[in-house]
Image: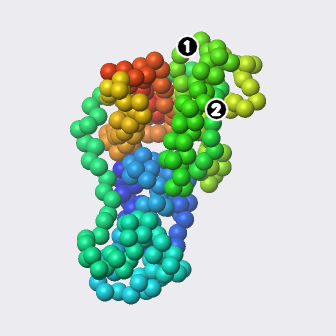
Amino acid sequence: MNYRNDIEKCIEYIEANIQEPFSVKEIADKAGYSVFHFSRVFRRIMGMSIMEYVRKRRLSLAAQELLQAEKIIDVAYNHGFDTASGFSKAFRKEYGYSPLQYIKRMKPFYQQGISDMKGIYTKEPQIVSKPAFKVAGYGIKTNIIGNSYTSDIGAFWDNFNGENLEAKLYEILNPIRHGEIGVCMLTSEWADIIYVLGVIVENFSKATDDMMLIEIPEAEYAVFETLPVNTVHDLEQREFAQVIKNTWKYIFEEWFPDSGYCYDEDKYDFEYYDERCHFRPDTVMEIYIPVKKV
């Protein structure tokens, strides 16, 4: 399934209607996806949420108009801002200076590009069938459409590590094997989700009231192992996090188009972290993508 082509068609639609009001649902409908699935695919490929992309495009187009001697108030209205002050605030946040300062500097407008991932990921995934299993763990509520999604997940990981919730999970649940599952659960049609980091359990009898419980159905998966990274001296594991992000991007942008598979929206994808991802010279993790033949 060619997700990249679908995203490009949606971007064409956005560009053609960039000065018109529209919703994420309207764009998702154009692609034939649910809001939740489209939002995830868009973020994985483009590196940002749909509305963040729209905001950046409107501001970059506004920047061009500013350099063409257009009035600030007119530019603001042309690109969906109700007031000049609201536009100026958004512009300063994006570029680091006000529209007036921008005009005075006469520098080319900034447009965030998408890094070229071709050739970076070379491993072929394993296609495996996995029976249903149960996960218990701790989670956070967020929204995949909003701009806070990435920071919410990052803050959750910081809290998970800072409060040593991993040790708490193993102490309370005593799972059969070591390994954490990171999974997103859709809770509404508007892409509200719960991100859960937990362990596989035989049943939920030991789970406490503050834990979240998920039953993962039987599914066929494409399993991607990330390229090894040396994290021995990288306490924040920034390079490892970037490799994971790059792998997700590769999956939806490069692997799916020629794979003969499509994403199975009735199942869960998840990340799997075990003893191989703890400050090793060959740190790796696995991404499980539910698939079905096209």
Q: Which residue lies furthest to the top in this view?
A: 176
Q: In this view, does 11 lie above or below 292?
A: below
Element marked by disc 2: strand
Q: What residue type is labelled 2?
A: Tyr
**Could you say which is closer to the camera, residue 264 or residue 185?**
185
**Three-letter residue code for mark 1:** Arg
Q: Which mark is residue 284?
A: none
Dot 1 or dot 2, earlier in sequence: 2
Q: Mark 1 points at which residue?
A: 177
Residue drawn 52% across and 81% down? 83
Secondary structure beneath dot 1 equals loop
On the image, numbered disc 2 is attached to which residue?
138
Give the percent coordinates (x, y) of residue 55.
Answer: 45, 66
Residue sticking out furthest to the left: 119
Tell me where residue 68 sits by quadrant.
bottom left
Q: Is residue 70 left or right of residue 55?
A: left
Q: Which residue is drawn at 32% across and 53% down?
A: 114
Observer able to see residue 198: no
Asked whether the viewer can see residue 249, the reply is: yes
Residue 185, picture quadrant: top right
Front position in the image: 243 or 2 = 243
Task: Look at the picture and state if 206 lies above or below 22.
Answer: above
Q: Quadrant location of the N terminus?
A: top left
Bin the neighbour count of mark 2 within 10 Å (Cα to Cα): few under 14, some 14-19, many 20 and up.
many
- In percent of width and height, residue 280 lies at 37, 20
Q: Residue at horizontal 50%, vertical 79%?
A: 85
Q: Quadrant of the C terminus?
A: top left
Q: Residue 262 in the image: x percent, y percent?
A: 44, 39
Q: In this view, does 285 lie to the left or right of 202?
A: left
